[in-house]
Amino acid sequence: MLLSDPQWLPQLLADLKLVMPEVILVVTMCMVLIVPFFKKGNVVLPVFVSMFGLLMALLYTQGIHLGVMDADRTGQVFTNTLAIDPFSSFFKTMLMIFAMLIIVQWTLFGREKTHALDAPDFLCLLLGATFGMCLMASANNLIMIFIATESASIPSYALAGFRKKNRMATEGSLKYVLFGSVSSAVMIYGMSMIYGVSGSLQLSHIAGSINQMGMTPLMVVGLVGMFAGFAFKLSAVPMHFWCPDVFEGAPTEVTTFLSVASKSAAVCMLARVMQNLGTIVIDEQVLIGIALGVGALGAVTATWGNLVALHQTNLKRLLAYSSISHAGYMIMGCAVLLLVDPKLILSALLFYVLVYMFMNLGAFTIAAVFERQLGTLNISDYAGLLKKSPVLAILLIVFMLSLFGMPGLGGFMGKLFLGVGLVKAGTLGTVLLGVLLLNTLFSLWYYLRPCYFMVFATPDTQKQLPVIQPLRPALWAILAVCCIMLLWTGLLPAITSDIAQDNGRMIVSSAKRQIALESEHTSTVPKRVVFTVAQ
Amino acid sequence: MYESLLNWLIFTPCIGAVACLLLPADKARNIALGTSIITLLMTIVLALEFQIGHSGPQFVTTLQWIPAINVQYKVGLDGLSLPLIVLTSALSVLVIGAGWKIEKSPNIFMALYLLLLSGMYGVFVSLDLVLFYVFFEISLLPMYFLIGVWGGPRKEYAAIKFFLYTLAGSICLLITMLGIYNVTSSADFVAGNTWDMMALQTPAIQALFSPEGEYWNFARWAFWLTFIAFAIKIPVAPFHTWLPDAHVEAPTPISMILAGVLLKMGGYALMRITYPLFPDAASLYWECVACIAVFGILYGALCAMAQTDWKKLVAYSSVSHMGYVTLGIAVLTRTGFDGAYYQMIGHGITSAMMFFLVGVVYERAHHREINNFGGLWLAWPKYGGWSMLGFFAGMGLPGLCGFIGEVMVLLGTFQAAQRVEDPTFVYIIGSLAAFGVVLTAGYILWMFQRIYMGKTRPEYDHFEKPTGREYAIMVTLGVAALIFGIAPILVFSYTNATFNNLMSVIGLAGLTN
């Protein structure tokens, strides 16, 4: 059908322009794999290539972003399977910056001999995962959602087990694969039901069919299945079991990457689904029902993550559970997307993701430093660290307090924006807000734990920790960037929040128009499908 | 030219804190002292430039802080804030004097203390709810470290307890704030949502929170949530349990600032936020709040009487005295409000002095067991004299600053009989609160007798005599207690116009004297 259209080639080229960042990423992946043929055992070259590729992709994203803004084009490409809109562009920009920081972090930490040989593999996997996450942020279609999720997950499985000889890493990676494949299966099962009921893979059409037929039980089952798949990527309770093990076992760079990028990409995907439903579905009851379900998922995730984090003694596991609870907060935001002005929530989510990226990056970087230099992740071993390396200790405290949501740091502003959105959503939103704030209260206890040991506790004289060697300047630079960003977003959030506001838009309106048109012409299609299913 | 002085007042301590950290550690004390003297001078200039008789905020700075959700950086000084600012500035100098001998990393101590000072100034001058919240929270963190690092044997426990309790209160406040922000958008006469405290006191918004208004249910919830938030800070009796621990473990200068200024943030916030915003809910529940307050007065006094730890006794006396503040506000009379406010100022002076007097002895004796003291007056006659002044001011002896607040609160309570149909309740409440004065006299005199009277003990000979620095602090506080005991006009001349306005906002202008 596509080929019968005489305009197919110009259309394809025009579409390709909009997905150029993803194309650049794929080309870079190939390049990274080819480069070692010419210069074996060199770290610098593949790192350079991948950084260059990411930078190009980043610039291209911004170019498209500005182009989209100016021309006010729909930005829905490849027969609406991908939506290139301000929200996804902003997110992709953040993701690429983040991937670059991760590469820097990885390069700096690598001191082993194998590092040089591993470089192409690692970078290729990282770029592949980044590519998948970019698609996740744009996916506007069930098939695309599935493909994007898988292409983000499969490199992640390999990344999680990257320390091949480490038992923890292998265990974590295996768990990740098993959970991932089961949840993928559940997701695609749910999607097939959704397709069966609505007769379309397009998110906006599915929402339109809910308008026409109401929430049939089959649709409910389908949606639950799909959200279960999302929950895996978000590490939402009850699909979170992989998270702490993977985070503990994986190299810290990978942990940082998964905890931020993978989760926030999943949040974007969830937000897009919710946004489509919220814009198109008319029935208030259905909307409240879905919001209730997703809100409950978020509330349970946040609470469970916090409660389990309360008695963690390992810094990385503690951060893993903290990231579960942060995912919970973001899911709550997505839940009320159906009920309030979406701009408010979308921009709050963007702001939150931005802040979350810097605080997690900072916290995990310090965890990595401690792991490598002190040889322990046990929080109680950090007693008296404030005296030995005051700057690192103070930075960790800053990141922890930001994760907790201390005013003056970015984490608080993220929660404030989210709270402003939540409270607008009536009773449900207020309840969710209450849950969020109560969780914040609990979380203080464990976020202060490292701080307690580093500042207050007296070190055990039996156990002598090695002295922390001076860090490389680039590592200080990463930490400084994180700290400055948190202070900046916390004290003077105006600029960041304005940017988030400008980008807190998703393209659904065109789909709305389309669905209106299509329902006039082809209103028979869904009915026929229902008939078939009923048989 | 003094418009921006208020901003400098808030941020000068921050600059001082950074200087303390960057410059050599042995200079930190001088830097901190210099910073606090500068802020004191600024405060004096502000007080002199302050237009008496003007009810609204002065020296106002308004800047857009977060335009996306309409948050402003709005600070200003009115009659409600000025005396507390003066108290803060004056105490801050004395507190640095009291902490002069801190041995353990004095630079970090002073930096945290100056950060705390910024937070306190910020709380007293913010006119925007979010800004207020930010300062309210920021003042918690330095306190946590100050207690946790420089405190006594159970410092970690006390520090985390303090942090968690007050944070629980803050969260109640945050929920209400977000609710208020949401509600204001539905008032079509307001241009968008607002966090501005002054805009929230306009009749249009007030109408929403009245019993006939659309958000009456919300207002009742909000009243209790904000009340709890600030009651934890004050602290009112059922929420007070963090206070004895925090005080006992905190080092002397921190106890002074905690009792002297931080507790006042709660009372101030009740007068600034809870009561002007939700006056109808307040008058609906006034009996309940008054009962809580009286319970606090009596319970605090009885607990103080049972203590054998000297510092804990003083800590419980704070619970009891701050109960009068709550009572004065709860009864909703002009005299009650004036009394409550004066009680805050008076208690700021006396509690700081009492904690300092305890600290002076504790530094030498290394214990605070009341029954192991005795005859201290004979050993240190001068110190004994100033102690008498301090503790008697705390007790509320006429002519000293503790008296005026308590008496006005009691008067205000009995005045409430005029506006209720059945005055029996008012009489009961008033009598019980008055009985609290007797209990106060009881525990203070009994403590005084056990510590200062009797035969002198041989171990006192080894104690170093109080130094000139310590006498200077005692004398300053003692003289202040005396001055504010005879010239309440010093405070009331500043607060009068603002309180008139506050009363009209609360809707009690016609009811009072």
Image: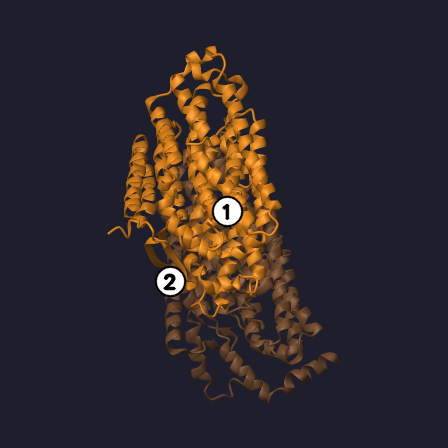
- In the picture as drawn, the residue positioned furthest to the top comes out as B458
Looking at the image, residue B416 lies above or below residue B186: above
The percent coordinates of residue A184 (x first, y second) are 62, 64
Question: For chain B, what colour was chosen?
Answer: orange
Say which chain is brown.
Answer: A
Q: Which residue is mark 2?
A: A55
* Three-letter code for the amino acid on which mark 1 is drawn: Ile
As drawn, the label of residue B219 is: none
Q: Secondary structure at mark 1?
A: helix
Looking at the image, residue A496 lies above or below residue A6: above
Q: Which residue is mark 1?
A: B329
- For label 2, the crowd category at 10 Å Cα-Cα, with few meaning under 14, some 14 to 19 and many 20 or more, is some
Looking at the image, residue B460 lies above or below residue A182: above
Q: Is B35 displayed left or right of A283 in the figure?
A: left
Q: Chain of mark 1?
A: B
Q: Is B36 displayed left or right of B336 in the figure?
A: left
Number of the front mark, 1 or 2? 1
* Three-letter code for the amino acid on which mark 2 is drawn: Leu
Decide if residue B186 is in sight here. yes
The percent coordinates of residue A176 (x first, y second) are 60, 55
Q: Residue at x 35, y 37 (%)?
A: B90
